[in-house]
Image (spheres, rainbow, N blue to C red):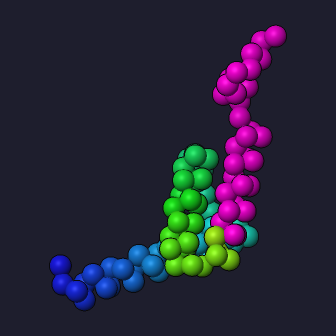
Amino acid sequence: MTKEFKINMDNYLDLTLQEAYDVLTSDTDPWPNEFQPKKKIKFIQQLMDYFQEREEYERCAKLLKLQKEVTKYELDNRKPSDRRGRDQSK
């Protein structure tokens, strides 16, 4: 792999992750229907890690807020059978 190719790939990765950030923090719901909440949370965490490495803490703060919203939504919309330690039949 040439140095120029690696630089272009790094730039492409940077642009892709920045675009993902822009889509996630937009006013529309960017998630595909089949995207499970755990996958959303993991993806958001990976973006936060990326922006932390680049010391872009304002973006991390927005992503953290989004991650909390996704987590809350997941907890609020779990089926009773998914809740551990609770017997819903009583």
Can you say which quadrant of the picture contains the N terminus? Answer: bottom left
Residue 89 drawn above or below residue 57: above
Q: Is residue 66 magenta?
A: yes
Q: Residue at x 75, y 47 (%)?
A: 72
Q: Residue at x 45, y 79 (%)?
A: 14
Instruction: Report which quarter residue 85 is drawn in.
Output: top right
**Horizontal and vertical percent position of residue 21:** 59, 72
Q: Residue furthest left?
A: 1
**Horizontal and vertical percent position of residue 79:** 71, 30
Instruction: Report which quarter residue 22 is drawn in.
Output: bottom right
> Left or right of 46: which side holds 64?
right
Q: Residue at x 54, y 50 (%)?
A: 39
Instruction: Report which quarter residue 78 is drawn in.
Output: top right
**Horizontal and vertical percent position of residue 40:** 58, 53
* Prevalent SS, magenta region: helix
Q: Residue at x 22, y 86 (%)?
A: 3
Residue 57 drawn above or below residue 89: below
> Left or right of 86: which side holds 7?
left
Q: Say whether residue 39 is visible.
A: yes
| Frontmost residue, 85 versus 32 | 85
Can you say which quadrant of the picture contains the C terminus? Answer: top right
Q: Say whether residue 20 is visible.
A: no
Q: Is residue 12 magenta?
A: no
Residue 16 drawn above or below residue 78: below
| Frontmost residue, 74 versus 35 | 74
Magenta-highlighted residues: 61-90
Q: Residue furthest top?
A: 90
> Left or right of 12: which side holds 90?
right
